[in-house]
Amino acid sequence: MELYEKVYVSEDFLESDHGDIGCAECHGGNPDAEEMAEAHEGVVRDPSFADPVSACGDCHEDEVESIENSLHYSLRPYWDKILTRASTDESVLAKIKEGYNTHCTACHSSCGQCHVSRPDSVEGGFVKEHLFVEKPDLVNQCTACHGSRKGNAFLGAEGYEPADVHYIEHGMDCISCHSGDELHAAAPEEGDRLDVEEQPTCQDCHEDVAEDGNEYHRRHVGKLQCQICHAQSYINCQACHIGKDAKGLPYYKNRVEWHEIKIAKNPEKSDRRPYEYALVRHVPVHPGFFDFYVKGGFPNFDKLITWKYASPHNIRKRTEQSRSCNSCHGNRSLFLTEEDLKKAPFAEADRALVVKDDEIPPRLETEGVEKAETALPELPLW
Amino acid sequence: MKVRRDGRWPMVMVLAAIFFLLSVAAVSAQESSCVSCHTDKEQLKKMAKLIPPKPKSAEKEGTG
């Protein structure tokens, strides 16, 4: 996006409801000035981040009610996780906070960064010439942030696996499943994004799958997370390194990534996720994550898992796992083992997720099992 | 309601009208100075050339 496009305002916007509001009323600045620098003195680029209630609350009272505590705005569970692992020494915590504020909080969002412009973390810019959009745009807004993992998988843009069936065959976008109620909801008092009650589940649309006559469903629904059979391989990250370069500019590096599927003991068992087994992915945390700011800042690193519950967004009806019973049964390579833990920095808490050899479902030798094998259709990559 | 007949009431009306006109003028001025620039693509292109690119670290590996 060219710089001028980022701030170009269309006549259509001026004729819209929001266009009736004077520019300075939301953005401040000095509208009497003739020079650009003077005119922009005190300008608030995104008033909805600075003060969402004042900026949007007069008209959108319900939506702003929980926005300051929402995941997108506050990122609060991130800091909670850091605190669980971090030293309680206040001087150490202050240095971790400095790193957190420099690198992590850049990924927030706001009313405006979902409904008017691209998010700050991708350097902003009006999506529709300052027109407000009710539904965030899949490419410019949602996957501008959630791109390297969710977006690329959903669109099939990584080149590893075909796009998600919901997108490529049914034209669905993020908002088709992730409603405004979910996205505006306050982060739960305890827990994280997986504990937001408004989150969608597969069964919201695929009701009664256990009684649909499918033998695989009859045997596995409720015990296995749906994605175990219906997701394709997904990205895992080894370890993210953050710091500042010689010019003092912040950076991050995630040197090693790999694609695979790993079935583990469900780390997020709850009423909403009662499955015995679920997919997990390695997230790029490690004990030296904040070493640039303070060494040894995480004496309690082992308390939380590094192989986290995964819900890959590259769903297909037919996958390698759903070819036949023995695609999974007896297939040790699909399960999270002790050897897998060594692929990346791990925590003691991860050991509870490991599927031991005697827990891997044995290969089925029953007559007719192999006949159930189905061919995978040729699928277009995006 | 009592109507004031001491001669001050018309003066209040005149002052209110002046205040209203000034407010309208101020709002118009605000809109015109911001809008005239931000709706002019050619003007924005010229100004964009004057703004230095935001410095970013060259150190980056992986897709993140």
Image (cartoon, rainbow, N blue to C red):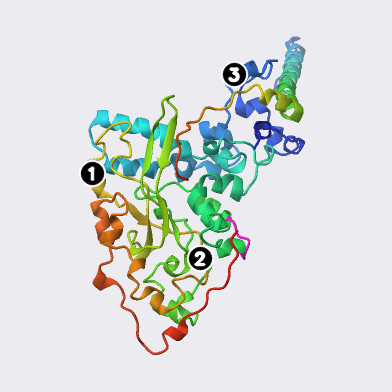
Q: Earlier in the sequence, mark 1 or mark 2?
A: 2
Camera-nearest label, 3 or 2 = 3
Residue A275, placed above or below residue A236:
below
At label 2, the amino acid type is Asp
Q: Residue at x 27, y 56 (%)?
A: A350
Marks 3/2 in contact by CB < 8 Å: the verdict is: no
From mark 3 to mark 1, how far is it between C-alphas? 45 Å
Q: Position of residue A191 (x, y in %)?
A: 35, 50
Count residues near mark 3 (Cα–Cα under 10 Å), then give few for <14, some for 14-19, many for 20+: few
Which quadrant of the view contains residue A273? bottom left
Camera-nearest label, 1 or 2 = 1
**Which quadrant does the N terminus of chain A fall into?**
top right
What chain letter is assigned to the residue under label 2?
Answer: A
Which secondary structure is most common in the magenta stretch? loop
Q: Which residue is mark 2?
A: A204
Q: Is residue A89 left or right of residue B41?
A: left
Count residues near mark 2 (Cα–Cα under 10 Å), then give few for <14, some for 14-19, many for 20+: few
Q: Which residue is mark 1?
A: A300
What chain letter is assigned to the residue under label 3?
Answer: A
Q: Residue furthest top?
A: B7
Count residues near mark 1 (Cα–Cα under 10 Å), then give few for <14, some for 14-19, many for 20+: some
- Which segment did they paint magenta? A169-173
Local SS, label 2: helix
From mark 3 to mark 2, how far is it between C-alphas? 49 Å
Specify whether disc 3 shares its chain with disc 1. Answer: yes
